[in-house]
């Protein structure tokens, strides 16, 4: 009789323990964006237009635009204008590039500046505004640039504001570096396209010195840097199985206490 009870307990509890270990998703439910060895990464060509050495304007960018005549004379003519540097900043207004890369500006109406560098856009607008002003001086600043960094430690992601021509290395450094559980040789750079459901995904390997050029890629708005975390099966398995084994041990203890009665 005792043998049958023990066997039943064994047959019930052991499958429960095995079930908890049967799936990686069960062991690591908070790990996201993992890829298999056969995942079709996009071809990484650092000399292509996709990886420009400067930031390029993109749809949904919010820009602060300022325009001065006479090559910006008013910016430095503080005595005659009576303005301080802070007052000059207030002359800027914010404009948003639409989904096609157009922005609506005073006098000019809709202007396409998508994919231009900031300096290219400034020079282009200076040319356009020369029909209305003498030697116009344009200044553009993107105020909503950001990148998302997953440094390899689930629950420790960062949303960072981009400066001028921020690189992959700089973004990872601002996020605190690759975590101890992150794989420096398996980093995904996810770049948005016109189709938000079909981004470009590039595989970076920053574990080797010869791949330093990959770390110097200039980031664009809404890029995602995902460092794949290491799956520490031993420690995670122990965490998952401990409650089951505790239940199992308790059941055995109860069984022997009953058996002594």
Image: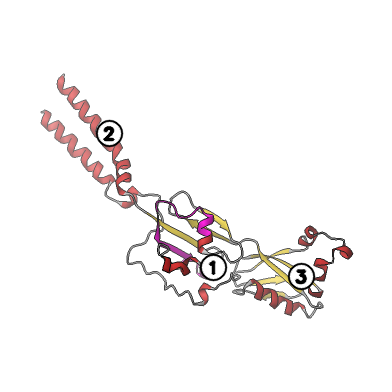
Residue 40 in the image: x percent, y percent?
37, 69
Distance in Å between CA atoms under marks 2 and 3: 71 Å
Residues shaded magenta: 171-199
- According to the picture, the residue beneath numbered tag 2 turns out to be 246
Query: Relative to residue 104, is residue 156 depicted above or below?
Result: above
- According to the picture, the residue beneath numbered tag 3 turns out to be 67
Dot 2 or dot 3: first in sequence order is: 3
Residue 193 in the image: x percent, y percent?
51, 70
- According to the picture, the residue beneath numbered tag 1 turns out to be 218
User: Under tag 1, what secondary structure?
Assistant: loop
What residue do we see at 33% from left, 62% from top?
A: 36
Dot 1 or dot 3: first in sequence order is: 3
Query: Looking at the image, do the residues carrying marks 2 and 3 touch, with CB atoms under 8 Å apart?
Result: no
User: Under tag 2, what secondary structure?
Assistant: helix
Is residue 175 visible to us here?
yes
User: Under tag 3, what secondary structure?
Assistant: strand
Q: Which quadrant is home to the C terminus?
A: top left
Query: Between residues 160 and 93, which one lies in front from this camera angle?
Result: 160
């Amino acid at each position: 009789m005792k043998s049958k009870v023990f066997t039943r307990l064994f047959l019930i509890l052991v499958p429960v323990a095995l079930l908890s270990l049967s799936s990686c998703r069960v062991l690591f439910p908070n790990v996201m964006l993992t890829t298999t060895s056969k995942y079709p990464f996009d071809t990484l060509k650092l000399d292509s237009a996709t990886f420009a050495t400067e930031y390029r304007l993109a749809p949904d960018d919010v820009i602060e635009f300022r325009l001065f005549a006479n090559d910006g004379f008013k910016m430095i003519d503080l005595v005659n204008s009576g303005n301080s540097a802070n007052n000059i900043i207030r002359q800027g207004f914010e404009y948003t590039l639409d989904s096609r890369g157009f922005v609506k500006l005073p006098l000019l109406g809709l202007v396409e500046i998508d994919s231009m560098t900031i300096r290219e856009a400034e020079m282009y607008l200076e040319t356009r505004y020369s029909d209305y002003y003498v030697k116009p001086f344009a200044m553009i600043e993107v105020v909503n640039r950001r990148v998302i960094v997953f440094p390899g430690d689930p629950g420790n992601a960062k949303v960072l504001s981009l400066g001028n021509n921020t690189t992959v290395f700089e973004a990872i450094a601002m996020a605190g570096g690759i975590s101890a559980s992150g794989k420096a040789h398996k980093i995904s750079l996810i770049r948005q396209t016109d189709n938000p459901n079909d981004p470009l995904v590039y595989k970076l390997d920053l574990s080797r010195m010869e791949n330093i050029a990959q770390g110097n890629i200039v980031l664009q708005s809404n890029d995602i840097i995902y460092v794949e975390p290491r799956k520490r099966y031993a420690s995670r398995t122990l965490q998952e199985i401990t409650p089951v084994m505790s239940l199992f041990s308790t059941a055995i203890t109860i069984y022997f206490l009953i058996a002594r009665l």
